[in-house]
Image (spheres, helix red, strand yellow):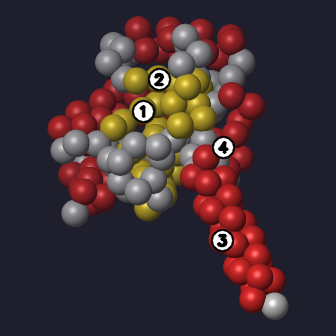
Amino acid sequence: MKFKKIAIGFAALVAFAFGAFMYLQNRGVEVYSETNEVYKIGSEKKPLCVFVWTSGCGNCVYSLPHISSLKDRFESMGGRFILVLGDDRLVLRQMAKAHYVRLNVQNLESFYDKNNKLCKKYGIIEFPTLLVFDSRGKLVKRFEGFVPWTESGNMNEVLSVFE
């Protein structure tokens, strides 16, 4: 009888450990750079801003120069800021590169959403969308549509993740 209780307790411990391991392994969504470098969202221990956009969206393209000032402030406080193209088609990725050059925003770290995994996980249906994660990888703020980031109130709302 005692052996049976020990075996059941051990099995429960193993099941819990396996579940915790799988949770940590599946945490975050992978996005890809042009060189197929993989970045897992939520894997770092610092705040993260993810600007999800598409190259065929006028508001998204108009937002790119404004996003640079938010990026600079966010990174100066110790966070990471990335752009994610919400589509993995090659022609749209080439258009995105052309927008970066034309608008002189090449200093932005850019990735693309392969198979729309990021959009599916976070329910992104409107572009542009800005996702703000805290240092534990938890989504804490979400902004949809065009937002004038140069206005201090909007920028301060994003930067509040550092408080």
Q: Is there CB contact under 8 Å for labels 2 and 3? A: no
Q: How far apart are marks 4 and 1 (CA)?
A: 15 Å
Quarter residue 77 falls in: top left
Residues 1 and 29: in front is 1
Q: Is there CB contact under 8 Å for labels 1 and 3? A: no
- Residue type (three-letter) at the residue carrying disc 1: Ile
- Dot placed on the residue nearer the N-terminal end, 4 or 1: 1
Residues 1 and 31: in front is 1
Q: Is mark 4 on a helix, strand or loop?
A: helix
Q: Is there CB contact under 8 Å for labels 2 and 4? A: no
What residue did someone put label 4 on? 119
What residue did someone put label 3 on? 13
- Residue type (three-letter) at the residue carrying disc 2: Ser
Residue drawn at x 45%, y 53% is: 137
Q: Is there CB contact under 8 Å for labels 1 and 2? A: yes
Position of residue 99 relative to residue 4, above or below, is above
Q: What element carries label 3?
A: helix
Quarter residue 112 falls in: top right
Residue drawn at x 47%, y 23% is: 110
* Mark drawn on residue 110: 2
